[in-house]
Amino acid sequence: MIILLFILGFILFISLVLVHEWGHFIASKKNGVEVEEFGLGFPPKAKSLGSKNGTEYTLNWLPLGGFVKLKGEHDSDTSKGSFGAASLKAKSIIMLAGVGMNLITAFVLFTIVALMGMPNLSKSIGFEQFTVKSDTKITKDYQNKGVIKIDSVVADSPAQKAGILADDQIISIDGVQINTTEKLGEQTKSNAGKQVSVGIKSGEVADVKLITLNSASPYLGVSSYSDEFGIQLRQSTWSAPIVAVGVMKDLTGATFKGLGTALKGLGSLIAGGITGNKQARQAGQTSASSQVAGPVGIVQTLYEGAKLGFGFMLFIIAIISLTLAIMNVLPIPALDGGRLYTMLFFRIIKKPLTQKIEEHIQMVGFGFVMSLVILTTIVDVSRIIR
């Protein structure tokens, strides 16, 4: 059942790309711009699926997105039926149509999820998630408390020598259950210098390690935190569409906050690398990487969502659809927002946006996006195999 839900989730994820590109497709047609190709995935082309009304439909080898190829896509093109020959208003509508479709999709999915039972992410986003209290019914409230996880391991410590890693869970010490960070501190201090049996859970694998603690702090050599995981589903009826809008607003704010944290971490990483400050560099790397996920991370998230059922799967797809909309309004060259802002910028400075300049900007932007995909993939893989 989990595999079937995962496959369904992956199909829905690919559908988000199709919906986004379909928005560009429809907007182009309505504004007199010819669509030469509608492709799923990025080139090179794997197969042509046929042509209709002057548009070739293709399947491409790189399953990282999709595209529509418009006639005369450059802003400077003046031929009839080309994107370049369209008015600025028409170009803006075409560029933002994909964003609009993703927002509509997210709204519909969040509405369905609210009717089924909306997960409460208040703890994750840092403030109370929107709901209409008079029309809210808690259908599930599961709290997994007392989970103590390792945040970091001190070099050359008893923990490191025993092979304990960050994100491992400490279950017990000499048979005493560890369910608070205070209990962990008490047990390690009271057994200072002694050999103890430490119950560890790494992923789904449980183990017991014999460890001789230091006689002085740090006794075990770890920093820990309480990882309380809770699932609360809040069901709505007549207010489901209102809840959908409210949750979209909450998650948009949380996304921009996360992007801010990632950029700040990236700044610390770069500054630390230039100045040789290892602590600043490591802190920046941790801060930046904790906020991003690439293709591997998305697949892993879909799989974890499948374990929790169809409602959670729809919830994840809705979040991804909203995130696609947000990312495509940011001024990132090669994405919709970047292309639109580039056109507007050259009109503001009253200089022509030539084909050469536009292609150079988009090439640099595409390189940046692909580099980001590669880096986030590396981060995702390191999280899985750590």
Image (cartoon, rainbow, N blue to C red):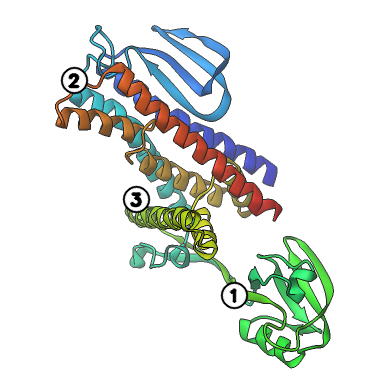
Name the residue beneath numbered marker 3: 241
Q: Earlier in the sequence, mark 3 or mark 2?
A: 2
Q: Residue at x 63, y 38 (%)?
A: 7
- Give the residue type at disc 1: Ser
The Cα atoms of the two marked residues, 3 and 1, are separated by: 35 Å
The reply to whether the C-beta atoms of the residues labelled 3 and 2 are less than 8 Å apart is no
Q: x and y percent of residue 321 in the render?
A: 43, 41
Q: Quadrant of residue 35?
A: top left
- Looking at the picture, tell me which residue is in the foreground, 308 or 192: 192
Kindly report the distance in space between the C-alpha atoms of the residues bearing marks 3 and 2: 35 Å
Residue drawn where x is 25% and y is 24% of the image: 91
> The disc labelled 2 sits on which kind of residue?
Ser
Q: Amino acid at mark 3?
A: Pro
Q: CA distance from mark 2 to mark 1?
A: 56 Å
Q: Residue at x 79, y 75 (%)?
A: 199
Marker disc for residue 226 = 1
Q: Are marks 3 and 1 in contact (CB under 8 Å)?
A: no
Query: Which of 381/30 is in front?
Result: 381
Q: Indicate the quadrant where residue 33 lies.
A: top left
Q: Position of residue 216 (x, y in %)?
A: 71, 88
Residue hosting label 2: 87
Name the residue rendered at 42%, 45% in the picture.
323
